Image: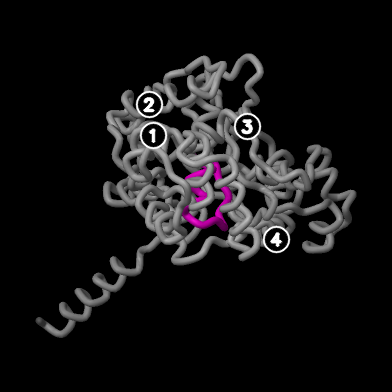
Amino acid sequence: MTIGGRIKQARKAGNFSLRKLADEIGVSAMAISKYERDQDVPSSGVLLRLSQALQVKVDFFFRPSTVSVQLQAYRKHAVLGVKEQEAIQMRIQDWVERYLEVESLFPEEQHAANLPLRKVTSLDEIETAALELRDHWSLGYDAIENLVQLLEDRGIKVGIIPGFEHFDACTFTYSTQSCKADGDPVIVTKGELSGDRQRFNLGHELGHLILDVQGDLKPEQAANRFVGAFLVPAATARFELGANRTDLNINELHMLKHKYGLSMQAWIYRAKDLSIISENTAARLFQQFRVNDWHRQEPGKPYPSETPMRMERLIYRALAEDLISRSRAQELYGKPLQLGWEMEALQQNDLAIRSGN
């Protein structure tokens, strides 16, 4: 990718219009347009101002492009604009490039996701597909303690993108210049979410990755059903709730939410889907949630969100083995690394040496 292409990528990732960026760095919108089309080359001073405005290092503009992103599924609100979608995709591409650079330092850490693709034509087949994936990953019927860690351990890259109100999640694959075939699957979800909503998004996108939806089934309907079936298999739901109920208690639902990481409302849907409760009972419970505004924020302590760890762990490993500098580690991670403990220990050691202790 040329310098102009990198400027355009950073501008879109920052959700800047040509005019807004031009005003920010003190040049004309026409000048920015010429830079992006490689009809003019920005001076070193302009590059510095661009890096400050777009919050990237100057080196970013000279970094070769190695990744092409292929979107597979997009979970978003109808009001998400084209510019915001472009910004999200540009941020994702930049993140994947940095992730792959870190990963390339440790070839033994690279492993394929090996996801089974399952053709489904009915809701019952989705339940079976969820059980087959659990069996493929040797999960049994227990609660999944950390879904992000599970996905990362199984070769799926997981990213968090903050700052976009109307974005929920997306799934994509990528190809590199050295390998034109699709790389590992990647799931990216919104940053500002409670843990149960985050897990629902991740499970939904996982459904898109493994389900080949055919017949009258709709892909979104299938992925929604998959989330519940994967996080709480039918046998587990009946073990927790019983085979037939006339009502569900709010406190009971709150406890199950924290045991399985599935929202209280998703538990109601799960009970209805498995005919543990009737349609009327489910409707009455949902009405109770709406009247109390619980459909927006469920009552009680929220379920904690989960954080991807693999990329950060590899960066710390690269630091420990002197494969990258501290400044390069910060650039690759894209935000401050927790180096404070190490610096504090070094300062204490230095003081001890100077004092002769």
| Residue at 82% from the left image edge and 49% from the top image edge | 32
Q: Helix or strand or loop: what does disc 2 sit on? A: helix
Mark 2 and mark 1 in contact (Cβ < 8 Å)?
yes
Tag 3: amino acid: Glu
Per the model, the C-alpha gap separating discs 4 and 3 is 38 Å
| Residue at 55% from the left image edge and 24% from the top image edge | 175
- Say which quadrant the C terminus sits in: bottom left
Of callouts 4 and 1, the N-terminal one? 4
The image shows residue 55, relative to residue 317, as above or below, that is below
Residue, disc 3: 220
Q: Is residue 66 visible?
A: no
Query: Of the numbered discs in the image, which one, if any, rests on residue 233?
Result: 1
Residue 298: x and y in percent read 53, 61
Per the model, the C-alpha gap separating discs 1 and 2 is 7 Å
Tag 4: amino acid: Ala
Position of 4 with respect to 160 (left or right) is right
Mark 1 and mark 4 in contact (Cβ < 8 Å)?
no
Residue, disc 4: 53
Per the model, the C-alpha gap separating discs 1 and 3 is 19 Å
202 vs 91, nearest the viewer: 202
Residue, disc 2: 131
